[in-house]
Amino acid sequence: MRTRGGMIGWGPRHAKEGDDLWIVPGCNLPVLFRPNGNVGQANHIGPCFVPGLMFGETAERLRTEKPDFGVADMQRIQLV
């Protein structure tokens, strides 16, 4: 898979374009979610491996440099 920012990674076979890559506090790996059309809800697609975005690297990048990926405000969602 490839992010909008051009980062290369590996994810679930059923991942598709338009899925959202989230950095979830407490998770070592980024997680893919798919918006399901209901406000505040998303379907869990699965974890993924993206070098540079795993094991706390994202938090470190946010502290030390301007990230080359989109950063959204934290929000609460309901997983279905």
Image: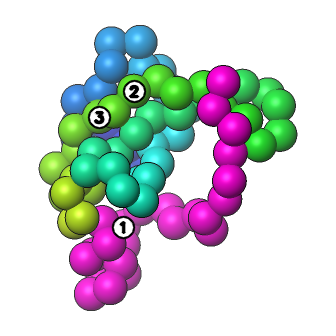
Give the crowd class for mark 2: few <14, some 14-19, many >=20 residues within 10 Å.
Answer: some
SS state under label 1: loop
Give the magenta-colored segment's residue range: 58-80
Q: CA distance from mark 3 to mark 1?
A: 18 Å
Residue furthest top as drawn: 14
Give the crowd class for mark 1: few <14, some 14-19, many >=20 residues within 10 Å.
Answer: few
Residue furthest front as drawn: 26
Q: CA distance from mark 2 to mark 3?
A: 7 Å
Q: Looking at the figure, which quarter contains the C terminus?
A: top right
Q: Earlier in the sequence, mark 3 or mark 1?
A: 3
The quadrant holding residue 10 is top left
Kindly identify the amino acid type of the residue bearing the numbered disc 3. Answer: Cys
Q: Report the predominant secondary structure element of the magenta stretch.
A: loop
Residue drawn where x is 27% and y is 75% of the image = 61
Q: Are marks 2 and 3 in contact (CB under 8 Å)?
A: yes
SS state under label 2: strand
SS state under label 3: loop
Residue 56 percent coordinates (x, y)? 24, 64
Q: Which mark is residue 68?
A: 1
Residue 8 percent coordinates (x, y)? 23, 41
Say if 19 sits above or below 67 in the image.
above
Residue drawn where x is 26% and y is 56% of the image = 53
Residue furthest right as drawn: 39
Q: Which residue is mark 2?
A: 46
Say if 61 sits above or below 43 in the image.
below
Q: Which residue is mark 3?
A: 48
